[in-house]
Image: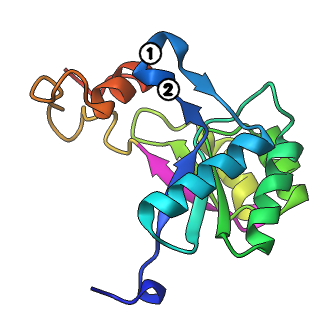
Amino acid sequence: MLPREQVQLASKFGIAIPDRNLSRVQVNGSPEYVRQCIEASLARLDVDYIDLYYQHRIDTSVPIEETMGELKKLVEEGKIRYIGLSEASVDTIKRAHAVHSITAVQMEYSLWSREIEEDVIPLCRELGIGIVAYSPLGHGFFGGKGITESLPSESVLVILYVFLGPIVK
């Protein structure tokens, strides 16, 4: 096994599926939930810190400054090293970055989804933020057929597939 220092670990928080009930899927960016998620992730992974911790989806009911304030505390406490955002708007990226530097932004980017070239990519270049392409193969279209039929119906992958959108059936 490699020493922890030689492993780069990324994880996400922010989507809650209470009791695996899709009708109750929530996006939660409250400071309390951020803290609850990191503590649970560190315990599950049996590590002292996560290198890159993403907010999986932006909770529009909580000001990004509040979420980022808690993430900044986690950086200061050494529980995370870097902060990432997924599917954030240009305005949200700017406001978040003003609280604490953002290391990476994950956005859908493929041959048929190139909207981020207009505003997100230039902003990230300006602020020194890396971009992680989400679904670069067009939700599986350019890489072959995704297969979810072989997964057990109770699999969290099937639940996320239904919630976040199909690969390609």
Give coordinates of residue 44: x percent, y percent: 44, 58
- Which quadrant of the rendered structure holds the C terminus? top left
Magenta residues, as a range?
126-134
Q: Residue at x 58, y 65 (%)?
A: 52
Give coordinates of residue 162: x percent, y percent: 36, 19
Amino acid under disc 1: Leu
Instruction: Give 84 or 120, whichever is nearer the viewer.
Output: 84
Q: Secondary structure at mark 2?
A: loop
Q: Give the crowd class for mark 1: few <14, some 14-19, many >=20 residues within 10 Å.
A: some
Q: Residue at x 77, y 27 (%)?
A: 60
Mark 1 and mark 2 residues within 8 Å of each other at the beta carbon: yes
Residue position marked by numbered label 1 in the rendering: 22
Q: Residue at x 51, y 24 (%)?
A: 18
Give coordinates of residue 165: x percent, y percent: 39, 22
Q: Residue at x 61, y 55 (%)?
A: 38
Q: Secondary structure at mark 1?
A: helix
Taking the view exactly as shown, the residue that stands out farthest to the top is: 23
Reply yes or no: does residue 129 show up in magenta. yes
Q: Give the crowd class for mark 2: few <14, some 14-19, many >=20 residues within 10 Å.
A: some
Instruction: Give 112 or 64, whichever is nearer the viewer.
Output: 64
Q: Quadrant of residue 84?
A: bottom right
**Relative horizontal placement of residue 144, taking residue 95 as reference (left or right):** left
Amino acid under disc 2: Ile
Residue position marked by numbered label 2 in the rendering: 17
**Relative horizontal placement of residue 5, taking residue 138 as reference (left or right):** right
N-term mark: 1 or 2 = 2
Cα distance between the residues tagged 1 and 2: 7 Å
40 in relation to 46, above or below: above
Give coordinates of residue 114: x percent, y percent: 52, 38
- Residue 112 bears which disc, if any? none
